[in-house]
Image (cartoon, rainbow, N blue to C red):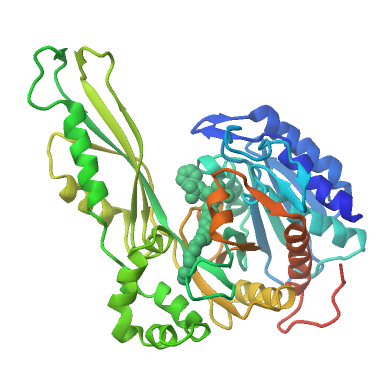
């Protein structure tokens, strides 16, 4: 495959608007087209005898790549083909044009997460074209509804594999990146492999009051009561969980990369922990790493200008810190609201998944680390961390204890804001490097323990 067709397959993928709009609103026409598209651009993947392809939940794809050595436990690569909506406003380039300009491919899904879908399949296509036969079996699971919960994609694939008795050595999904420019004073990029992710709660608060004529309003309306309740929640941060462990580990690994005195502060968190945790609260991204976050995302009330509203509803999206549970957060929320007129309806809730191992025996973690060192030799630090978003991998905790969330891409604060925001784009070089990463990763996963030096070169 030449360089042009290498990126051409991504622009074609971005062009198909596989948007997940809401809980049950997906662009099924686009999802079906996407299925045909991957079939047409990766012909070798689909015609190889030891690669089995199944469609699950109508639009998700499960590939089973049968390795030659059944004694090696299989692993799985995850990605998702659906994207969040992208109205044209504010974009430099129309979000579904997939235009390649100035060394970048533009559009919704270029970072989240069609880049991974295409890079995984492209790496496999290239390996198969070179007659590579993997020793270790692996699965590729491409969900179609990650952006609206993964219930029809990831969850069904997970149930199917469980019914087949599959147990996996590890899973690699989207999530963290090689972070660049997120921490003042730290000029060097560092790779964070997320070994857990936050839990999540969608909570609806509702207040019902007797409706009436607005010319003689009661002292309090459903809107006023609800607004006060959600404002109390927004103004009362959840407890800072910095002391609980994982983030401390991440910061200690980063410590020696900082200039004096930050290096000393981060190496002595037993003493400076409270100071560091307070500093982290000041920035909205680092704050998300130390606590359960509260985001007021939807508000609905009122039927007419001159009618006292009978009902007011608000939805709050909490991301639960790995050191807390859904139950603990709900207790705190009830105590903060402290108003019996406010009803609570939990729309969905999931506890944070267990922390995956990152020690020397942790195969998935060590393979990622080894491949990062090889493909990104300029990156000195690879550390375990927390993913602040949720991923399809949360549906697979029944199949393995080793779940790693890592995109082999650089991310800076501006590109972070483009994910679910505007002007999402990936450089051609970054995409090619992602393909190279997966191409090497699959080969590294076939080695018994130590890396072998003579891999196929891209
Ligand atoms: C030690 C200092 C480190 C500095 C930290 C910087 C962290 C920045 C990197 C964060 C990248 C986060 C990307 C998360 C990918 C999540 C994918 C996603 O969007 N998932 C959806 C899933 C979802 C959840 C709930 C309802 C519908 C969909 C999400 O919203 O989380
Ligand atoms: Zn995603
Ligand atoms: Zn997303």
One can see residue 48 in this view: no
Residue 310, relative to residue 375: is it above or below?
above
Residue 132 at what x, y percent from top left? 88, 65
Q: Is residue 220 above or below residue 142?
A: above
Q: Front-most of 151 and 195?
A: 195
In the figure, is residue 159 to the left or right of 127? left
Percent position (x, y) of residue 281? 33, 64
Q: Nearer the viewer, residue 298 or 118?
A: 298
Q: How many marks?
A: 0
The quadrant holding residue 340 is: top left
319 horizontally vs 369: left or right: left
Q: Can the viewer see residue 378 in this picture?
A: yes
Front residue (pair 188, 343): 188
Locate the C terminus by quadrant.
bottom right
Residue at (64% x, 55% y) in the render:
78
Residue 323 picture location, percent across and down: 34, 66
Quarter that holds the N terminus: bottom right
* Place of residue 68 in the rendered image (x, y in percent of width and height, measured from the top left): 82, 67
Q: Is residue 354 above or below residue 383?
A: above
Q: Residue at x 58, y 37 (%)?
A: 90
The structure residue drawn at horizontal position 34% and vertical position 70%, both measured from the top left corner, is: 279
Looking at the rendering, which quadrant does residue 153 occupy?
Answer: top right
């Amino acid at each position: 495959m030449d360089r042009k067709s290498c990126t051409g397959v991504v622009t074609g993928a971005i062009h198909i608007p596989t948007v997940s709009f809401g809980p049950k609103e997906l662009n099924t026409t686009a999802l079906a087209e996407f299925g045909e598209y991957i079939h047409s651009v990766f012909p070798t993947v689909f015609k190889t005898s030891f690669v089995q392809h199944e469609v699950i939940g109508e639009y998700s794809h499960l590939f089973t790549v049968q390795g030659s050595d059944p004694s090696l436990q299989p692993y799985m690569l995850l990605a998702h083909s659906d994207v969040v909506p992208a109205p044209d406003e504010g974009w430099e380039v129309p979000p579904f044009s997939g235009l390649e300009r100035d060394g970048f491919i533009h559009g919704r899904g270029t970072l989240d997460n069609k880049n991974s879908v295409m890079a995984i399949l492209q790496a496999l296509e290239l390996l198969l074209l070179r007659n590579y036969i993997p020793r270790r079996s692996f699965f590729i699971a491409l969900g179609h509804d990650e952006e609206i919960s993964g219930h029809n994609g990831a969850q069904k694939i997970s149930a199917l594999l469980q019914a087949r008795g599959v147990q996996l050595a590890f899973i690699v999904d989207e999530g963290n990146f090689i972070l660049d420019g997120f921490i003042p004073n730290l000029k060097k990029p560092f790779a964070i492999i997320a070994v857990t992710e936050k839990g999540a709660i969608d909570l609806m608060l509702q207040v019902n009051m007797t409706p009436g004529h607005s010319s003689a309003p009661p002292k309090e309306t459903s809107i006023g009561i609800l607004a006060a309740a959600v404002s109390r929640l927004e103004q009362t941060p959840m407890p800072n969980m910095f002391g609980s462990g994982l983030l401390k580990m991440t910061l200690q690994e980063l410590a020696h990369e900082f200039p004096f005195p930050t290096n000393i502060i981060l190496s002595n968190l037993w003493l400076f922990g409270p100071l560091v945790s307070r500093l982290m609260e000041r920035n909205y991204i680092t704050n998300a790493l130390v606590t359960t976050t509260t985001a007021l995302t939807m508000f609905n009330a009122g039927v007419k200008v001159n009618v006292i509203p009978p009902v007011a509803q608000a939805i709050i999206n909490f991301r639960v810190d790995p050191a807390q549970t859904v139950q603990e957060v709900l207790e705190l929320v009830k105590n903060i609201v402290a108003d019996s007129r406010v009803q609570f309806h939990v729309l969905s809730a999931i506890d944070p998944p267990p922390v995956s191992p990152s020690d020397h025996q942790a195969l998935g973690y060590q393979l990622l680390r080894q491949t990062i060192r090889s493909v990104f030799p300029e990156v000195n630090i690879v550390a375990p961390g927390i993913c602040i978003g949720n991923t399809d991998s949360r549906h697979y905790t029944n199949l393995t204890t080793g779940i790693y969330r890592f995109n082999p891409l650089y991310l800076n604060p501006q590109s972070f804001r483009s994910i679910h925001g505007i002007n999402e784009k990936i450089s051609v070089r970054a995409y090619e490097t992602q393909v190279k990463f997966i191409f090497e990763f699959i080969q590294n996963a076939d080695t018994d323990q130590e890396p072998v030096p003579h891999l196929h070169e891209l």
